[in-house]
DNA sequence: ACCCTATGCGGATAGTTGTCCATTTAATGC
DNA sequence: GCATTAAATGGACAACTATCCGCATAGGGT
C-alpha cells in the first residue's frame, strides 16, 4: 500500500503523474510520501483561495497557513508565488502543448500552423489571465528573465522556431533570423500587453488575433 | 530671491524646469519651496545609490534614509520605486521625444520615420535598461497596466499611431487597425524581452533591430 | 525490529513596501 | 509682525516575502 506510482492518472487532482514532457514543477517522482502529500495540500489550498478571492489578493503566507504548512515547507517546494502558479498551470499548459503537437503531425503548411498556434495562445491568455499575470509579477528584479526561461515559454519558442524554419526551407517564407523573430512573433501576445489591450483598451480577442495575423502575413506594407 | 522659475534650465540637475511636454513626475510647479528641495534631495539620493550599487539593489527605505527624509515624504512624492525611476528617466525621455518630434517635421515617408523611431527606441532600451527594468518591476499586481498607462508609453504609442495612420492614408501601407497594431509594433522592444535577447540569448542590438525591420517591412512571407 | 541519515518540517526572523496620522511648517491675508 | 490653514513631514506600523536553522521523521539498510 502507498507505493509510488510512476504513471497513470491517480485519484487526486489528476495531473500529478503525467509524463513530464514539459515539466513545470508539478511534482518530483523521487519525492518522499509525506512531502508529496504536503505538496498536494499546498496546491489544493492555493486553488481554493485563488478561486475564492482572486490570485492577486492571496499571499504566500496565507496559502501556507490554509494548507497547514510552514513557510519553510512552502518555499522549499515553490521558490515564489510565480512558481506555484506555474505548477497550477501545468495541466492547462500540458493540454495546450498536446493540441499543438498533435496538429504539428498534419501536412498543413508551417505558417498556417503558426497562425493557429497564435490564435490558440490568445485563447490560453484569455483562459488563464490571472495565473499568467501572477507569474509575470513574480518575474522581476533578480528573476527578470524567469518569464522567458520557464519551460512553457521555452517550449513555445522552440515550437515557433521549428515552424519558422520549416516555412523558410519550404519556401513559404523569405529568409529570416528565426531565433530572433520567434520571440518577436510571440511578443505581441505577452500577458501584460494582452491584458492592457483587453481591459485598458477594450479590444476583443478577435481584433487582437486578426491584427497579429495581418501583421505577420505581410508586414505593414502589404495589402490589407 | 528664491523665486519659482517656470522655464529656462536652472543650475541644479538641469531638467527640473523644462517645459512639461511629456511630464513624468519630475516636479510640480505649484510646489511649496521646502517640498521642492526635498524632492531634489530624494532624486539626488536615488541617483547616488543607484550609481553605487545598481538600481535593483537599492530599497525605497534606503533612499529615504540616505536623503534624510521620512517614508511618508518619500511615498507622497513617488508612489513607488517605478515612479521614482520614471522621474529619473524624464530627462532622457524628453530628449528622445524631442529628437523624434524633430524628425517628424521632415518630409520623410512615415514608415521610414517609424523605422527610425524603433531603432532609436532600441538605443533607449540599451542606454536605460536598469531604470526601465525597475519601472517594469513596479508595474505588477494592482498596477499591472502602469507600464502602458505611463506618459512615456502613451506618447510612444500615440506617435506610432500617427505614423501608421499617415502611412495608410498616403498609400505606403495597406489598411491596418492602427490602434491595435501600434502596440504590436512596439511589443518586440519591451524591456523584458529586450534584456532577455541581449543578455540571455546574447544577441546584438543590430540583430534585434534588423529582424524587427524585416518583420515589419514585409511580414514573414516577404522576400528576405 | 532497529538504526541511520538524507530529506523534510515549520516557526522565528530579517528586510522591504506602502499606509496612516499626529505634529510641524510655509505661505497667504491682515 | 501675526494668525490661519492647507500642505508637508517623519516615524510607527501592518502586511508580505523569503531565508535560516534546530528538530523530526520516512524509508532503506542490516
Image: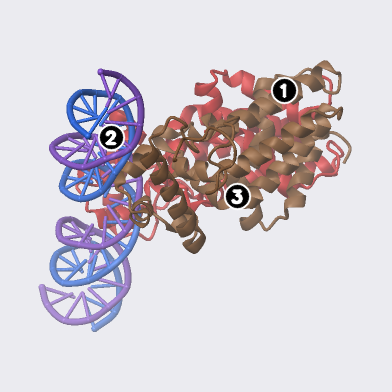
Chain colours: A brown, B red, C blue, D purple
Q: Quadrant of the C terminus of chain A?
A: top right
Q: Would you say B43 lies left or right of B201 here?
A: left
Residue at 79% of width from left, 20% of height from top? A166
Counting residues from the start of the chain, the first of labels 1 and 3 encountered is 3
| Chain label for disc 1 | A
- CA separation, marks 3 and 2? 39 Å
| Mark carried by residue A114 | none
Q: Are marks 1 and 3 on the same chain?
A: yes
Residue at 83% of width from left, 42% of height from top? B168
| Chain label for disc 2 | B
| Mark carried by residue A128 | 3
Residue at 65% of width from left, 51% of height from top? A126
Residue A187 point in image, percent of width and height: 64, 36
Q: In this rendering, does residue A190 appear at all?
A: no
Residue at 70% of width from left, 48% of height from top? A123
- CA separation, marks 2 and 1? 45 Å
- In the rendered image, the vertical position of residue B59 relative to residue D13, given as above or below: above
Q: Would you say D18 lies left or right of B179 here?
A: left
- Label 3 vs label 2, nearer the camera: 3
- In the rendered image, the vertical position of residue B204 relative to residue A72, given as above or below: above
Q: Are marks 2 and 1 on the same chain?
A: no
State the residue in front, B193 or D22: D22
Dot 3: within a 10 Å radius of its alpha carbon, few (fewer than 14), some, or many (20 or more) residues?
some
User: Disc 2 on helix, strand or loop?
Assistant: helix
Give yes or no for contact between labels 3 and 2 (Cβ–Cβ under 8 Å). no
Q: In this rendering, does residue A127 appear at all?
A: yes
Which residue matches tag 2?
B49
- CA separation, marks 1 and 3? 25 Å
- In the rendered image, the vertical position of residue B175 relative to residue D2, given as above or below: above
State the residue in front, B113 or A165: A165
| Mark carried by residue A162 | 1
Dot 2: within a 10 Å radius of its alpha carbon, few (fewer than 14), some, or many (20 or more) residues?
some
Amino acid at each position: 500500500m502507498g507505493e509510488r506510482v510512476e504513471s497513470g492518472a491517480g485519484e487526486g487532482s489528476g495531473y500529478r503523474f503525467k509524463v513530464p514532457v514539459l515539466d513545470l514543477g508539478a511534482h518530483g517522482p523521487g519525492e518522499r510520501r509525506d512531502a508529496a502529500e504536503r505538496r498536494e495540500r499546498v496546491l489544493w489550498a492555493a486553488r481554493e483561495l485563488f478561486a475564492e478571492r482572486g490570485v492577486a489578493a492571496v499571499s504566500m503566507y496565507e496559502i501556507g497557513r490554509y494548507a497547514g504548512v510552514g513557510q519553510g515547507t512552502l518555499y522549499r517546494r515553490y521558490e515564489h508565488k510565480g512558481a506555484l502558479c506555474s505548477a497550477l498551470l501545468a495541466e492547462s499548459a500540458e493540454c495546450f502543448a498536446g493540441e499543438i503537437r498533435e496538429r504539428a503531425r498534419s501536412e498543413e503548411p508551417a505558417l498556417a500552423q503558426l497562425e493557429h498556434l497564435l490564435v490558440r495562445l490568445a485563447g490560453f491568455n484569455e483562459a488563464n489571465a490571472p495565473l499568467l499575470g501572477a507569474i509575470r509579477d513574480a518575474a522581476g528584479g533578480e528573476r527578470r528573465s524567469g518569464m522567458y526561461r520557464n519551460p512553457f515559454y521555452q517550449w513555445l519558442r522552440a515550437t515557433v522556431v521549428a515552424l519558422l524554419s520549416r516555412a523558410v526551407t519550404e519556401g513559404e517564407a523569405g529568409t529570416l533570423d528565426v531565433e530572433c523573430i520567434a520571440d518577436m512573433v510571440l511578443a505581441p501576445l505577452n500577458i501584460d500587453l494582452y491584458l492592457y489591450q483587453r481591459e485598458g483598451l477594450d479590444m476583443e480577442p478577435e481584433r487582437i488575433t486578426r491584427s497579429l495575423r495581418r501583421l505577420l502575413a505581410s508586414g505593414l506594407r502589404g495589402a490589407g
